[in-house]
Image: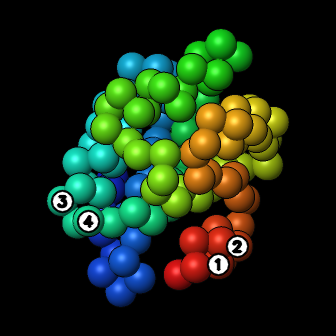
Amino acid sequence: MSFTIKYDANIQCLKSHFTGTMDVKQTKEFAGELAKHALEYNCHFLLNDLRDAVIDMTTFELYSMPMVVANEGMDRKWKRAILCKHDQLATLGFYENVAKDKGWNVKIFTDVEEALSWLNL
């Protein structure tokens, strides 16, 4: 598992890329780092690229993710676009529905340009 997080000053957005197995432990670490960067740059627009991630979570763990990432410092008001591959749509679509039901501003995409457009960047 590895990830990068970079602030793109041109569009005022945090861009991240996650590679490898993404389970609850790695997601906590990733979310904590995203929160630190968001606060450091006062940035509330996030583009999370999970196309190289292997999601390894049960349905219950996915259902719990909004609370897990909140506990790591992420804010439900931040606008977050998540990029995924087509074969991840069902899993991450479930997460999107759960997160939206809990008041999170998150949407799943397979296209970078669509994600940036939704973020209004």
Mark 2–mark 3 distance (CA, rounded to whole Å): 26 Å
Q: Which amino acid type corresponds to the residue marked 3 in the rendered image? A: Glu
Q: Which amino acid type corresponds to the residue marked 1 in the rendered image? A: Ser
- Looking at this rendering, what residue extends furthest in the bottom direction? 10
Residue designated by label 3? 40
Q: Are marks 1 and 2 in contact (CB under 8 Å)?
A: yes
First of labels 1, 4 by sequence position: 4
What sort of colour scheme is used for the picture? rainbow
Q: How many marks?
A: 4
Q: Secondary structure at mark 4?
A: loop
Say the numbered circle drawn on residue 117: 1
Say the numbered circle drawn on residue 42: 4
For the point 54% across and 27% down, the residue is 65
For the point 67% across and 54% down, the residue is 107
Q: Is 9 above or below relative to 19? A: below
Q: Secondary structure at mark 2?
A: helix
The 10 Å Cα crowd at callout 2, few under 14, some 14 to 19, many 20 or more, is some
Q: Is residue 7 left or right of residue 21?
A: left
Q: Is residue 107 left or right of residue 46?
A: right
Mark 1–mark 4 distance (CA, rounded to whole Å): 20 Å
